Image (tube, grey):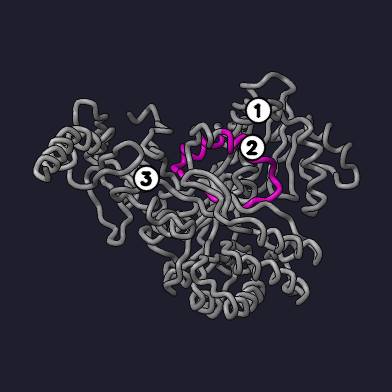
Amino acid sequence: MEKVKNHRSFIFLLCLFPFFAASQTPDIVLYNAKILTIDEDFSIHEAVAIDDNKILSVGENEAIQSLSSSETLMIDLEGKTVIPGIIDSHLHYLRGTNFASHETRIHGITSKREALSIIADKAQELNPGEWIFIFGGWHEQQFSDNPGGFTQEDLDRASPENPVFIQKTYSAFYMNSLALEKIAPAVPHLYKGGSVIRTTSPQGREVMYAALKYYPFATSDEGREREVKDFNNYLNSMGITTAYDVGYLDGSYKSVSALADREELTLRIFYAQRYWADSPRTAVAAAELLEREAPFKRDHFFGEYGIGEHVYGLLHDNPRMSEPFSQSIYDSFELIALSAAKHGWQLNEHAMLESTVDGMLDVFERINLAEPISSLRWTIGHNDLISMAAINRAKSMGLALTVHNHTVKPKVDGIASPPIKLIQDSGILWGMGSDGTVVATYNPFHTIWEYTAGKVFPDIQKYNKDEVITREEALIAHTRSNAYLMFMEDLIGTIEPNKYADIVVLDKDYMDIPIDEIYTIKPVLTIFSGKIVYQDELSF
């Protein structure tokens, strides 16, 4: 009887063999490529096979091609470079979705003539009276042909029949005459004449509110989902397949969630717990919230995890501050952070000044004595003026760091910040993000160029040659390291078997082109979870 049972089991397995074999036949094979796997050895291969949503195998052309069938999509990349999908560990994502369908962008444009031409082309697409909006991501000094802001005359010539509203930061805005006719009466106590309104960030909200009355926001669920898809498409076109939204009051995630439920997202979107605390009483409420709510409410594609970027709203520094924060502010911050440690929340905090980093580390060291935090992968972001001593203190507790894009920010007081080479050489885990959308370009190759070429636009040397990092180190920070920060190191961040097939094909050889050209790299193909989500039609 036992023999019969075993025989039947063997026959059953033979019947299943075609199913198992078929499951190992790839849907897509990319070959004749230079595949930068970003694995621990930074190994380079010729081909990769994708089965369903995962990477099946990576290797040499002949071996990978032999896995294919007549059903496999075979793509000859003719020597193009392939990298893992890029992860942005610090993006104000939802803010970007709000304006994606109608925004004009001048990210990385180093000619004012070209920027004005982009505005003029947009005006030609619109009916007279329709508004042109640019929401940040640029700086007055990025134009090599004519540094400085836009004049009213420049904007009037580029767009004589359409109002032009250009946000530079949260407190500076440029406009043509048609836009000023609408905006200036709404903010008469701020407008001083000319094409630009400069004010403080709180007053800058008045300018934004006045302008956004004319922005064509979607009014239906379908329209809002279209805006989200438009932004996702733009991110895919830059090679981004995962983003962490560290915003807090940028609108509702309803439409993003609906797309996730229907499996229509074309990148992984994760976001921080959304609360706001700016007083001792609301700090208590935030701590209680973290006690009640479970962390990591997400799957592999969408959801909430962590807290930040402003754990406590009043602990929010900037490079222009001169006085350190009071102990009472750190006390409220500590109350929330302690609750996060007790209940398993990942924490991602904003700190630009050395004094702020030191104050936070004092808090973290006290918490670490009672509630060890090394497994929580807490992260300090920005780190513009972090010291070597602070880096070592953070490393000793298992903390990580993130740095962000500064290509639209000139060197301040002769200081190259953040100290990228010190961070890299310290051995601390660190990741790279953009801080887009308003204050920085969110093109990852702009960020990588800054820290490898050591420059800011239009070609201004910011770092000395001994202060930059290698292109390998920069790419690791934007992929593999960020995956670890998101607790997804076994799923994304490298091109290795059994990981999600998040893959980007580039138009230039990342490893061999001159370092000064890295910011010009463009993806020609982006694959997300095994599906082609962006393709440059001119390249294939």
Badge 2 vs badge 1, beta-carbon distance below 8 Å: yes
Mark 1 is surrounded, within 10 Å at the Cα level, by few (under 14), some (14 to 19) or many (20 or more) other residues, namely few
Determine the residue located farthest toward the left in the rendered image. Answer: 3
Q: Inspect this view and state whether residue 140 appears.
A: no
Quadrant housing the C terminus: top left
Q: Nearer the viewer, residue 511 or 484?
A: 484
Provide residue 147's location: percent of width, then percent of height.
Answer: 62, 48
Which is nearer the N-term, disc 3 or disc 2? Answer: 2
Instruction: Kindly identify the amino acid type of the residue bearing the numbered disc 2.
Output: Lys
Q: Secondary structure at mark 1?
A: helix
Residue 238 lies in the magenta stretch: yes
Provide residue 166's location: percent of width, then percent of height.
Answer: 70, 39
Q: Which residue in the protein does label 2 denote? A: 254
Provide residue 290's location: percent of width, then percent of height.
Answer: 66, 60
497 left or right, relative to 279: left
Separation of residues labelled 3 and 2 (CA atoms)? 25 Å
Provide residue 463's location: percent of width, then percent of height.
Answer: 49, 65
Q: Which residue in the protein does label 1 denote? A: 221
| Residue at image location 48% in from the left, 41% down from the top | 267
Residue 223 lies in the magenta stretch: no
Residue bounds of the magenta highlight: 231-258
Quadrant housing the N terminus: top left
| Residue at image location 72% in from the left, 24% down from the top | 130
